[in-house]
């Protein structure tokens, strides 16, 4: 076994692993959630905004378990079955068609709803109208709802970036070590949807332009660290990526059909185009700062 293991950007030493084993022996019967909460406090494992990284810590423990480094207790609750979808509330929305060019309508309003009473409304919009349904994105995330004269017309969200994407790393000039150190500078456009009765030309590219102008500020306010680059993945057999190109995002390549949880190189997922949008002119310099 290696003396040091790196998982989720954290270098685990032999002493760290011994702490985990001692905690498992003493409190493992209380379940995996309890273990991750306790380990966060033992390590003082926090996000930049001060919140404990409990979800990341739980994933770290699962990865150690899969590698055979530790043995976790059986889950106290049954795991979600394949195909499980997050429950969302049904919505009663006005579905009258809005059609025309964006300049013929009042200026839409883009509202950050994360950590507000409106976050569940965002979840329901995505659950009802996005072709993938609603699923909580990984790690840190921000969610926005777009309204036109107080009527919802769209929703968009961002979350932690994908762990490894070959064409993205080539575009940035990252080696594996630098990527692991600086991945938190990137975020992922996780979901975006225009409601099906909204047919307003240029609305999607307007939303992308408006949200990228405020993302750095919003992320800093909520998570207390900077971001410099946004990524998204566009399923090429389903979409053309027109709104991203219109908003000056750059297509840098394609995925190879593996998901974030494919550890055996056997998953056959849809090929997606990878689009990137720099939030600052010196993003490459920032991405290489260790």
Image (spheres, rainbow, N blue to C red):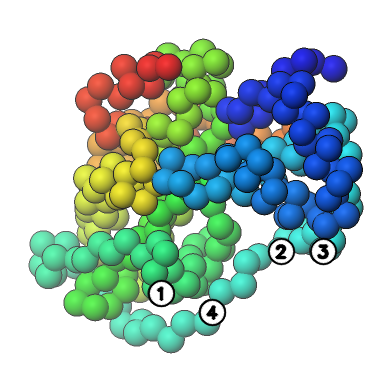
Query: Where 136 sits versus 62, above or below?
Result: below
Residue under label 2: 84
Q: Are marks 2 and 1 in contact (CB under 8 Å)?
A: no
- The residue at the point 41 percent across, 26 percent down is 252
Q: Is residue 154 left or right of residue 59?
A: left
Query: Where 283 sits versus 148, above or below?
Result: above
Q: Earlier in the sequence, mark 4 or mark 1?
A: 4
Q: Earlier in the sequence, mark 1 or mark 3?
A: 3
The percent coordinates of residue 173 (x first, y second) are 42, 14
Gap in angstroms between the C-alphas marked 3 and 4? 24 Å
Between circles 4 and 1, the one closer to the viewer is 1
The percent coordinates of residue 118 (x first, y second) are 39, 73
Q: Are marks 4 and 1 in contact (CB under 8 Å)?
A: no
Count of numbered circles in the view: 4
- The residue at the point 39 percent across, 83 percent down is 93
**10 Å crowding of disc 4: few (<14), some (14-19), many (20+):** few
Query: What number is the disc on residue 117?
Result: 1
Residue under label 4: 89
Between circles 2 and 1, the one closer to the viewer is 1
Gap in angstroms between the C-alphas marked 2 and 3? 15 Å
Instruction: From the viewer's side, name the closer residue of 252 and 137.
Output: 137
């Amino acid at each position: 076994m290696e003396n040091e293991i790196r998982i989720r950007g954290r270098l685990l030493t032999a002493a760290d692993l011994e702490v985990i084993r001692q905690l498992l022996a003493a409190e493992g019967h209380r379940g995996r959630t309890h273990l991750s909460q306790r380990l966060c406090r033992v390590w003082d494992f926090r996000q930049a905004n001060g919140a404990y990284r409990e979800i990341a810590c739980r994933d770290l423990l699962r990865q150690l378990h899969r590698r055979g480094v530790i043995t976790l207790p059986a889950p106290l609750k049954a795991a979600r079955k394949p195909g499980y979808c997050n429950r969302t509330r049904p919505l009663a929305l006005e579905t009258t068609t809005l059609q025309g060019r964006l300049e013929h309508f009042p200026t839409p309003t883009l509202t950050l709803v994360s950590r507000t009473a409106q976050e569940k409304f965002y979840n329901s919009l995505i659950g009802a109208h996005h072709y993938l349904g609603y699923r909580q994105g990984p790690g840190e995330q921000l969610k926005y709802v777009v309204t036109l004269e107080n009527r919802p017309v769209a929703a968009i969200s961002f979350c932690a970036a994908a762990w490894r994407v070959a064409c993205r790393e080539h575009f940035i000039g990252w080696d594996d070590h630098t990527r692991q150190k600086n991945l938190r500078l990137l975020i992922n456009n996780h979901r975006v949807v225009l409601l099906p009765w909204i047919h307003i030309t240029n609305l999607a590219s307007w939303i992308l332009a408006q949200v990228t102008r405020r993302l750095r500020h919003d992320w800093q306010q909520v998570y207390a660290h900077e971001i410099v680059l946004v990524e998204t993945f566009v399923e090429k057999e389903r979409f053309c990526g027109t709104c991203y190109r219109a908003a000056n995002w750059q297509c840098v390549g394609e995925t190879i059909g593996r998901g974030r949880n494919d550890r055996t190189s056997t998953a056959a997922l849809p090929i997606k185009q990878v689009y990137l949008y720099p939030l600052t002119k010196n993003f490459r310099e920032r991405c290489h700062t260790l």
